[in-house]
Amino acid sequence: MRIILIGYGVVGQGLTSILQRRHAETVKDYGFNPKIVAVVDKGGAAISPRGLTLEKLQAFKKNGSIATNPEFGHPKMTAIEAIESVEAEVVVEATSTNVKNAEPALSYITKAFKTGKHVVTTNKGPLALAMPALTELAEYNHVYLRFSGTVGGGTPMLEFAKRCLAGDKILAIKGILNGTTNYILTEMAEKHISFQQALDSAQKLGYAETDPSMDVDGIDTACKVVIMANWIMNKKLTLKDVNIKGIRDVSLKALDEAAKKGNTIKLIGSIDGDKPTVAPTEISKRDPLCVSGVLNAVTFVSQFAGEETLIGRGAGGMETASAVLRDLLDIRHKLATKLLT
Amino acid sequence: MRIILIGYGVVGQGLTSILQRRHAETVKDYGFNPKIVAVVDKGGAAISPRGLTLEKLQAFKKNGSIATNPEFGHPKMTAIEAIESVEAEVVVEATSTNVKNAEPALSYITKAFKTGKHVVTTNKGPLALAMPALTELAEYNHVYLRFSGTVGGGTPMLEFAKRCLAGDKILAIKGILNGTTNYILTEMAEKHISFQQALDSAQKLGYAETDPSMDVDGIDTACKVVIMANWIMNKKLTLKDVNIKGIRDVSLKALDEAAKKGNTIKLIGSIDGDKPTVAPTEISKRDPLCVSGVLNAVTFVSQFAGEETLIGRGAGGMETASAVLRDLLDIRHKLATKLLT
């Protein structure tokens, strides 16, 4: 399987590393023989039909861009040009999220579809703004769109819901879906510090961006709610359908009051019926959902099997890259089954 | 798919109920059209090639045995005779666990294999004592053996590990796998009562048996460790390979000491390398694994995706029956795929 990788940040580098380290096993266990034939970053593209190795890519990444490689580099080539011109089966889209207009990722994904390529993305923007349309476009072009890494990082939240509860029915989903806000709320409650102090600490540790709005205003959580509602519960939602309230107004007083009752306040994203919501919510400290620090957790309420809670790290380059590998294996499996029918 | 159901306790009744309630969906979503053609309990068998309904079975269950039904009843027929004589594709074995010699379930399962029938079991006994041999016998007879309900009740612990971490590698597993002991330890720590008092309370609530040895001596947990090690990590273990220590000697003093450090003591079953172990273990109250009451929890340590913890109720008739349905759907899916190859 030939792969065009767009974006060479922590996820792209993690994927290149995992594919090399697990190569013997993926071939043996899954009949999956991946080859990264092109990588595009802001400086241009590196292309090799025989496959690019981590070592060569890393060496030139250190120089500023992989495109500076004299053997494989195409310093002026854009992602769109690479998707159009390089022969490959799959585009892995791992650029950063933009929830205003989802660009440039949206154009990359649609271009991939139109040139007959499957897409694996770790980018919440295009899905949050246009998931129903993208799903249709993929179907129309007979290609697959996969996005496990957009929810839960490496923790297989989406796969769990889709694959592990066959025959049952998921009635509701609720989760702590953003590690940054969970870190801030945990610090406030445990160290008795203000929102601003906890935010400063999160920024120092690299958990929060300089502009922390995506996290603290609940937008990142809302994107994940949209993706889960559509993928797991067959909704047709976009970001504007979600009722969103962030954590800027959570006070120490409210946290103290909650603590007196054995509770705490967490930023919960939920879908119960047709009301997707993101809001600070009081929950019991004994609730399995009540995880601390940067952990993520999701509870699935099912008709027969009861409530299941899945907990894991919600971020990380290597973790998210492992989700991309799962998606690639899923596409490979789907294609193999399709050939038989 | 024609099913012979052996054992008509809470799981058997739950399954009959779920299959009826979800019938329209299982046909539509999975092409799965199940029919319970025979049910065997201690009083004999009820047989109907056209399918037995919950209503008819329940009416005669109330009279003592389903075999008293004048239309379908065969009061003297044994499970072995039913497996031999009734035409069916699958045997669902839902009798109670015996870890001495695994009988009579072991004979039922091997008889099913030898007559070409797939088996779904919720019974830990045969797996704990003879899983490597049973797996081989199933392969030799070209039939499937499935047992999701043996670990985690309705919570898909086994499926999660097998299906949701493709391409990754599970390095270690640790879990709270027995609700009864977890209830006892939670009560001791929170209410500051003795082991005996907590056990009495568990027995009153129906969480513990009159002879509580299977639970409190760690045998139930050890059975689940064997099943997970074999199924998930490709080991060839039986119960005698597990180093087992139960909770009878956990003192209030030890729980108090642990609490001072922000920890508590839980009965943990684990597989790390080649050392399957069951023992009371001190863990942090902040560890996602640290669930209270009758909940079960398992942490999978994977190479790339990090640590994932799955939490749910570990028992319940309806919950365990939902695991049987998942197994039936898996067999149906495997058979459909096989036809194509």
Image: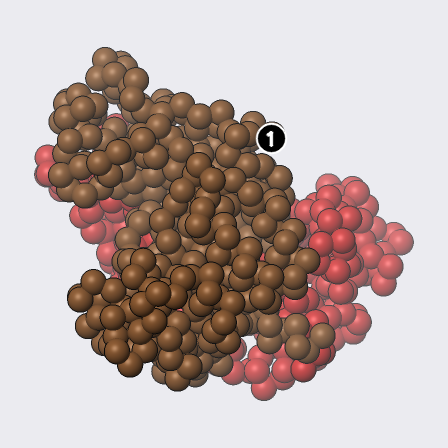
Chain colours: A red, B brown
Taking A225 as reference, is B212 above or below it?
A: above
Q: Does residue A169 appear left or right of residue B240 in this picture?
A: left
- Indicate the quadrant containing the C terminus of chain B: top left, top right, bottom left or bottom right: bottom right
Taking A247 as reference, is B221 above or below it?
A: above
In the image, what residue occupies the spot 38% across and 79% down?
A: B48
Taking B153 as reference, is B198 above or below it?
A: above
Q: Nearer the viewer, residue B131 or B306?
A: B131
Q: Determine the residue located farthest toward the right in the rendered image.
A: A71
In the image, what residue occupies the spot 85% across and 63% down?
A: A49
Q: Residues within 10 Å of mark 1 (few under 14, many from 20)?
A: few
Q: Secondary structure at mark 1?
A: loop
Q: Position of residue A32 (x, y in %)?
A: 74, 60
Q: Position of residue B278 (x, y in %)?
A: 44, 28
Q: Position of residue B79 (x, y in %)?
A: 42, 61
The amino acid type found where label 1 is placed reads Gly
Residue B196 visible, this orientation? yes
Which residue position holds label 1? B273
Q: Nearer the viewer, residue A117 or B117?
A: B117
Q: Does residue B60 appear left or right of residue A122 in this picture?
A: left
In the image, what residue occupies the spot 66% across and 67% down?
A: A333
Q: Nearer the viewer, residue A11 or A310?
A: A310
Taking B255 as reference, is B289 above or below it?
A: below
Residue B144 visible, this orientation? no
Name the image quarter holding residue A329.
bottom right
In the image, what residue occupies the spot 82% across and 57% down?
A: A51
Q: Determine the residue located farthest toward the bottom in the rendered image.
A: A140
Name the image quarter holding residue B292.
top left
Q: Position of residue B83 (x, y in %)?
A: 48, 66
Q: Chain of mark 1?
A: B
